[in-house]
Image (cartoon, helix red, strand yellow):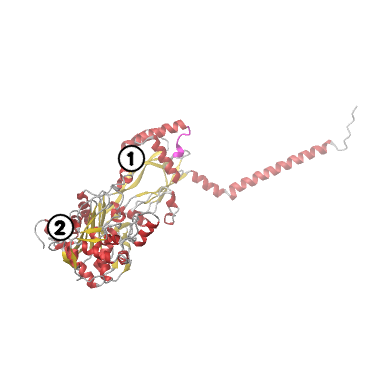
């Protein structure tokens, strides 16, 4: 028989167990108590706020951009209300087959393939993950009604009211006003867009880009109450802070002059460009390019529009040829050659040259247009009849120096113009160092030669410039040596028309031009435009405003001759420079001069309208 030997009484062991259990219970209770106390007392306000936030949603209200106006207050760009089809991707069915079916139905309604719907979602979510995806703007009321009647088939789909840019005159000043679009990932990293969020719209080109911070307003917010499904409850709007619209931007552009230039250039049916600018302060009255485009097509372009706008390298309608073109200029370059030769002492205004129709340099022959011989000519006469031989000889005299290039560079050729638009193309002012470097790198078959300078003296050869740069050169001649800063921004106004900011652009630089040399060149240009056998007298001979002008006919590889005309008006104290060029337009007087005439008629409408109607000058 086993005898239990335990000195401790059974009551003591039981008491110990009860004590341990009680201690554990007390600890657990204390933990629970302090946790509840922390939740309800210490963090109560925080969790209450979170609970309330779960019952509310904040909706961002996009601010409409400011209007873009011409200098007379005429609207070039404003806004219109549009309905956009949007999708909250977080509410799509979880089942892949059901999701695909809904997206396919949406695509059919929005005239989008399933592939395009998925691509649109992917692109927008890459920029703004979780934000509603805009599938299409300007949806019709039939689509809206159908979705509302069948909402259960389209979870997460809504139609929202948005603002879309509106262009009352279609293509007018398209290259100047530019376009808008959603800010992308790279732009969000830039300092000027640091306050923006994915989905916000910013300027993408033209003044929409350059003056974006003035045109872009501040968004508003609306806070609404929602149910457990995240749907708005009746009367659930709690707080509404309206957006602040952007300010209006007034441009230096004159809408009527702009329309005249575009109409005149468009009537030629060929690519080209024009610019008309105040020579003293750089205000651009008109600037355009052909082919042009309708900015509204950039909002929701079709595939055909994408191909035409972005992928046609010949027409290139989005390229502003006035600032991004790169061309030889022909004889309108001769004023630069004349200034270089006069200022460096090669000639005086009265130096006579015998023009026999051609010159020979080594084995090369350089001829006047058509081989015409002009006989004895001095500067004024050489400009009037556009004697190439006269300027060939000046180029030959300066070929071993860099004097011609130095003057061209000072006048703005081959260097940035400083325009307040983002689009400004690369140009080329050829010189000895440039070609010799190409020859050293075996990218050309010869070094710099006399022929290169001879060609440059008449605006030919490897020269690549554009109407804007030539306008600066003519402006400096017209005003006596000041290179203005070209610009299209004039002032910022609020919705009531009050001026908030005026843009002041200082001249870029000043160069010395002898007043006597300037007068002689202007006299030659005046004779070329309006006297006797001047090269443009047939176009401007009866024009009521005295002008000084020069034709240009430029040869281009694989193209017919390019037409140029440059005018300073009114003569002899000009205020405005106007330049036009027409690709494959032939002689300067054939295509470009008539475009300039259309522009000047719009500028000087009272006198010019009398001539146009056959009534003669006032």
Residue 309, horizontal then vertical, whole percent: 31, 45
- Crowding around mark 1 (Cα neighbors within 10 Å: few <14, some 14 to 19, many 20+) is few
Q: Is residue 501 magenta?
A: no
The region drawn magenta spans 89-95
Asked whether, in this view, residue 127 is left or right of residue 365, the answer is right
Relative to the observer, which residue lies in front, 571 or 200?
571
- Mark earlier in primary sequence (2, 1): 1
**In the rendering, at what x and y percent does residue 160 appear?**
37, 43
- Residue assigned mark 2: 539
Query: Is the Cβ of the residue at disc 2 closer than 8 Å to that at disc 1?
Result: no
Position of residue 424 measured from the top left corner of the image (x, y, whole percent): 33, 56
Q: Is residue 385 left or right of residue 32?
A: left
> For this rendering, which residue is in front, 432 or 567?
432
Label 2 Cα neighbours within 10 Å, binned few <14 / some 14-19 / many ≥20: some
Disc 2 on helix, strand or loop?
A: helix
> Residue most toward the left?
615
Label for residue 173?
A: none
Residue corresponding to mark 1: 303
- Residue 4: image quadrant is top right
Q: Nearer the viewer, mark 2 or mark 1?
A: 2
* Residue 120: image location, x then y, percent: 40, 40
Residue 94 falls inside the magenta stretch: yes
Dot 1 lies on which element? helix
Residue sitting farthest toward the top: 1
């Amino acid at each position: 028989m086993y005898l239990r030997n335990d000195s401790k009484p059974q009551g003591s062991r039981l008491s110990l167990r009860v004590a341990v259990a009680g201690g554990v219970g007390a600890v657990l209770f204390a933990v629970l108590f302090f946790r509840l106390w922390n939740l309800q007392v210490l963090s109560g306000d925080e969790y209450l706020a979170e609970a309330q936030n779960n019952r509310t949603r904040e909706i961002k209200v996009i601010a409409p951009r400011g209007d873009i106006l011409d200098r007379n207050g005429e609207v070039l760009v404003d806004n219109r209300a549009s309905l956009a089809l949007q999708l909250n991707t977080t509410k799509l069915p979880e089942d892949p087959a059901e999701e695909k079916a809904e997206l396919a139905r949406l695509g059919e309604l929005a005239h989008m393939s399933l592939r395009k719907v998925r691509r649109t979602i992917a692109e927008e979510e890459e920029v703004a993950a979780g934000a509603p995806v805009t599938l299409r703007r300007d949806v019709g009321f039939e689509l809206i009604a159908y979705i509302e009647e069948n909402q259960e088939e389209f979870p997460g789909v809504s139609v929202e009211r948005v603002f879309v840019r509106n262009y009352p005159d279609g293509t007018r000043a398209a290259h100047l006003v530019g376009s808008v679009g959603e800010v992308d990932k790279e732009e969000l990293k830039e300092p000027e867009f640091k306050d923006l969020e994915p989905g916000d719209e910013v300027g993408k080109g033209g003044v929409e880009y350059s003056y974006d911070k003035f045109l872009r307003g501040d968004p508003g917010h609306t806070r609404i109450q929602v149910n457990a499904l995240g749907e708005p409850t009746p009367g659930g709007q709690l707080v509404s802070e309206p957006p602040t619209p952007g300010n209006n931007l007034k441009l230096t552009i004159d809408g009527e002059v702009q329309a005249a230039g575009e109409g005149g250039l468009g009537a030629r049916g060929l690519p080209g460009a024009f610019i008309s600018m105040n020579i003293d302060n750089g205000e651009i009255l008109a600037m355009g390019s052909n082919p042009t485009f309708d900015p509204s097509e950039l909002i929701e372009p079709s595939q055909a529009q994408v191909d035409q706008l972005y992928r046609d390298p010949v027409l290139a309608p989005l390229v502003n040829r006035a600032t991004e073109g790169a061309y030889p200029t022909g004889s309108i370059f001769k004023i630069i050659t004349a200034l270089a030769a006069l200022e460096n002492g090669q000639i005086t205004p009265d130096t006579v040259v015998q023009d026999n129709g051609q010159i020979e340099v080594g084995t090369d022959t350089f001829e006047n247009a058509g081989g015409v011989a002009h006989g004895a000519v001095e500067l004024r006469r050489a400009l009037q009849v556009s004697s190439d031989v006269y300027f060939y000889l000046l180029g030959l005299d300066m070929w071993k120096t860099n004097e011609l290039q130095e003057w061209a560079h000072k006048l703005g050729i081959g260097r940035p113009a400083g325009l307040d638009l983002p689009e400004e193309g690369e140009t080329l002012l050829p010189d000895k160092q440039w070609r010799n470097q190409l020859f050293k790198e075996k990218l050309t078959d010869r070094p710099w030669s006399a022929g290169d300078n001879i060609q440059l003296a008449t605006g030919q050869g490897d020269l690549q410039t554009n109407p804007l740069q030539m306008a600066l050169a003519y402006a400096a001649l017209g005003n006596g040596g000041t290179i203005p800063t070209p610009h299209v921004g004039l002032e910022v106004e609020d919705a009531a028309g009050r001026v908030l900011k005026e843009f002041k652009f200082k001249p870029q630089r000043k160069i010395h031009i002898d007043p006597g040399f300037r007068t002689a060149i202007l006299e030659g240009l005046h004779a070329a435009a309006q006297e006797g056998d001047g090269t443009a007298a047939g176009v401007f001979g009866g024009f009521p405003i005295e002008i000084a002008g020069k034709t240009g006919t430029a040869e281009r590889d694989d193209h017919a001759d390019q037409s140029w005309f440059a005018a300073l008006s009114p003569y002899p104290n000009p205020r405005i420079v106007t330049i036009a060029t027409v690709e494959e337009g032939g002689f300067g007087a054939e295509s470009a001069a008539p475009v300039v005439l259309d522009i000047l008629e719009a500028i000087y409408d009272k006198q010019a309208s009398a001539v146009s109607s056959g009534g003669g000058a006032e």
